[in-house]
Amino acid sequence: MKKHLLMVIAFGMGSVAFAQNGTTLHTGKVAPRIKPEIANKAIPYKKQMLESGTPGFQAVAHTENQHHQQSVTASRSFTSTVIGTTMYDLQTNASVCNRIVLNADSTISATFTMSHDADATSAPNRGTGYNYFDGTNWGVPPTARIESIRCGWPNIGVTSTGGEVVVSHEATGGTGNVHVLTRPVKGTGVWTDTTLNYPDVWPRMVVAGSNGHTIHVISQTTGASPGNPPFHGQDGAIAYSRSLDGGITWDKYHTVIPQIDSSNYLGFGGDSYAMDAMGDTIAIVVGGFDVDVVLLKSTDNGETWTKTIVHQFPIPLYNAANMDTDLDDDGVTDTIETNDASVAVLLDHEGKAHVWFGRMRVVEDPGETNLSYFPGTDGLYYWNESMSEAGIVAFAQDIDNDNTLNVTAWGSYQVSLSSMPSAGIDTAGNLYLAYGSIYEGIALNGLPGDGKSFRHTYLLRSSDGGLTWCGPINIVDPDNSDLYDYTEGVFGAIAKRVDDNVHIIYQSDHMPGHALSTNNVDPQEPGVESEIVYVKLPVNSFDAFTLADCDSLFFDLSSVGIKESKDIATSVNLYPNPATNSVNLLFNLNNSEKVNVKIYNVVGQELNTFEENLPRGNNSLNININNYRPGIYFVKTMIKNKVVTQKLVVE
């Protein structure tokens, strides 16, 4: 018997109900399950350790059901600009790099992995594509990399003095060095290339510090690569380096942070980590199919670190070569709820860390030497430092509203059907989330790989610190309706600073998947040029969403499949709201029912609970809130199998 390990509480703004065909995330809207023949398939997983960009899979079978968000219609009024092109169409193996910066003067610096070589796999001229918005216009799409040697995976930052920093990795024969390119004036001038002489790949970089020009870099050591021994006992360690002077010297050089060393983890896969910074506060989040989601946080500019396990993998130091997932030793391997290694982290204006990661399920039977994962798993998790556990913030959308996600195949990214998160924040503290998700529109037919559905990039906004999320807005191909359904839009990267607009870049082409998978998984991709598209989305685009379009964060995965009674109640309302001393809970019941009411504070603590047997017709329950402090609370009403959770403001 396969089993889930994580069950999260369902509460928050809006209506949450459980139905036979799925789970309601918006008022009156049912989120359907994915087709069993898709959800029930698991394939072997191999941790990405080489810079080939070629994971490689073969298919086996396991079972589980899924469920997905219903479509939300919103205005798609925004502008997009192609700022670059590339034949090398793999921007990350999992987590999205910091690839775009909105500067205080409204200029923008953006980077991407670029090659115009016909052979995308070898791509001898691959390197950083760079473009700059001067406040009025973008530059001409680049044709040459900024490095002198084959590189990839660029991160960009801007110092307090207006200089630019790009960190990428050299890639020659699967190994290389980390490169730090700097120039004193953003948007113009010659790059100075400094090589950090360690053979790491897939770096992440932020520019921070109270001085505004401290550079923090993490990267994956290539311990499992041919000819490279383990690094401090780990195959795929995460190494940390720091420069206090903008990259001239490095006082911390290729070190392992103790909280994620070999005594805690055997190693990590490529691109399974992300960084953010605000002044002297630095946040690193790390994940992986067989490891915890870990937040590492420093408040002293990288001198010391504290560790928080956001989402725990239940088997410490898991080794797929000689372990399996039979957690209770009953002779039956268990399906484990884990993460897909695609993670993101953002520090808000108070320095609180917000973390996102794709949901994944894995299993390994006795005698196997690799985990198998379920590529039909869907769900994007969210957590912040005020929460005890993570909850679901996004699923794929049911475009045709038939309670079924009508997809049969898709491009190979080895992540959840909703994943690749990237986040930003505006001056008011509103959070903005970009993520990629399978698109239930027209599938690709008539070419190799018939029936593959595309992925699109979506945006959500939270105006209450992550409790509820409004949207989503689909930002793919707004100006060409003829090609909208046939567009793959992935690897969305948001500029952390949001002004009157959300600034984001993503990769677009008209074939699902990418060209760098083994076994010709996406055979139609090689030779197809991808575009790097910049989108400027006005933040007031989210004002069109009503309360019904805003999802509560928490989502009880264990409750999927409970039958919904359609004749329970026609309405459940709170009045007045906001309230001071008491609030009335109003019901219009179609039958006599037992009603259970629970009240929670904003961090999910239960403050009050009671039950009442109510007759058919209109009913009113008066709730005394005289002892409640001013703030936000949640009133959760359960009538049979229907659950309605509403936001209550106490003044």
Image (tube, grey):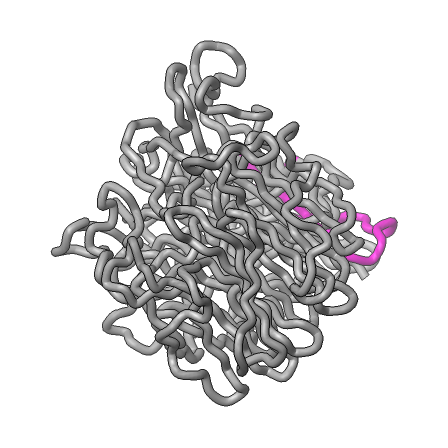
Position of residue 133 measured from the top left corner of the image (x, y, whole percent): 50, 82
Residue 546 visible to an observer of this rendering: no
Position of residue 498 measured from the top left corner of the image (x, y, whole percent): 60, 72
Position of residue 218 measured from the top left corner of the image (x, y, whole percent): 60, 51
Rendered view: 369 above or below 564: above
Rendered view: 191 above or below 125: below
Residue 120 visible to an observer of this rendering: yes
Chief secondary structure of the magenta portion: strand
Q: Quadrant of the C terminus?
A: bottom right
Q: Is residue 257 left or right of residue 44?
A: right
Q: Which of 249 and 490 is in front in this view?
A: 249
Q: How many marks?
A: 0
Residue 622 in the magenta stretch? The answer is yes
Residue 320 in the magenta stretch? The answer is no
Span shown in magenta: 613-640
Rendered view: 428 above or below 119: below
Residue farthest right in this picture: 627
Residue farthest bottom in this picture: 136
Q: Nearer the viewer, residue 572 or 453?
A: 453
Position of residue 214 measured from the top left corner of the image (x, y, whole percent): 71, 63
Name the residue at 52% across, 38% down.
Answer: 236
Q: In which quarter of the image is the N terminus?
A: top left
Name the residue at 40% across, 34% down.
Answer: 46
Name the residue at 54% across, 87% down.
Answer: 135
Residue farthest top in this picture: 330
Name the residue at 66% across, 61% down.
Answer: 215
